[in-house]
Amino acid sequence: MTSSLSTAIAKLNSPKWSSVGKISFATTGLALIATALGATSAGAATFTIPSLTVFGNDISSGPSFTVSDDFAGADLISLEASGIVDLATDEPPLGYFTNAAGIATQPTFAGQSPGGSATGPGGFNFGALLLGNNTLGFFNVFPANSSQSPSLSLNGVTLASLGFTGGFANGTVLEFRVNDVTSRLNNAGSYNVAGSLASTEVPEPFTVIGTLIGGTAAVRLRKQLKSAQK
Ligand SMILES: [Ca+2]
């Protein structure tokens, strides 16, 4: 319940107001309205990141989506990615197979053991799934020390913790890429990605509606009080 609504109800319960008939009934009604509002406004803003396939050669550009609604740096992202990418099809028989965190899933031609990694462009692991755009920059989604599992999930971490300290404004276009050098498009495989964004803020409409209803009810009760005093 908002403080303004609490104050309104408290005033209605004061001896002065309670001396008027129908006040307790009206107060109960306000409390019920406040409860109903609280129940209907409990869900914060959410945005579904569409299911996308990010191919091994999506290095300089990749699949994109447009964020609707505003999300702050303190808001949360959840993401799942499954699949394996080979960054070096021209290095048989081992190649360089990684999951979406850039963790080797089998021995690589460069000497990594399963679970190992190597730092690539941007300071992120070779093979890491990147999210961002040219304005905000690109950041790895999964921690550099993730497991070697081909299925990874991120459950409700802040956008700021990934590097998006200012969050995403409504209409921001974001892109997924695979972290690798761009000199040779010798990659194969893909990551399947899906997820969501969730606001952690209390929705503004609750405060506005609660104040409006509280104010309207108070005006009506004052009119009733005046007529009762006549
Ligand atoms: Ca490559």
Image (cartoon, rainbow, N blue to C red):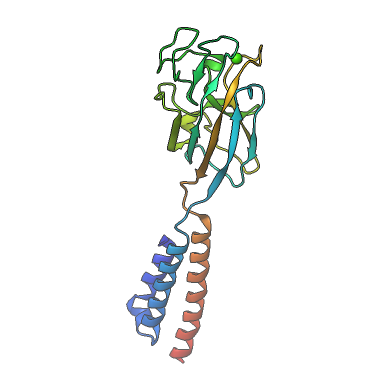
Q: Is residue 50 left or right of residue 98?
A: right
Q: Looking at this rendering, what residue extends furthest in the bottom direction? A: 230
For residue 176, which quarter of the picture? top right
Q: Is residue 179 above or below residue 202?
A: above
Q: Quadrant location of ligand 1?
A: top right
Residue 6: where, in percent of width, then height? 39, 65
Q: Residue at x 64, y 33 (%)?
A: 63
The total number of labels drawn is 0
Q: Which is nearer the eye, 73 or 93?
A: 93
Residue 65: where, in percent of width, then height? 64, 39
Q: Looking at this rendering, what residue extends furthest in the left direction? A: 15
For residue 192, which quarter of the picture? top right
Q: Residue at x 65, y 15 (%)?
A: 182
Residue 164: where, in percent of width, then height? 53, 31
Q: Residue at x 60, y 10 (%)?
A: 90
Q: Is residue 61 left or right of residue 168?
A: right
Residue 49: where, in percent of width, then height? 56, 42
Q: Is residue 101 above or below residue 1?
A: above
Is residue 173 in sight in this rendering? no
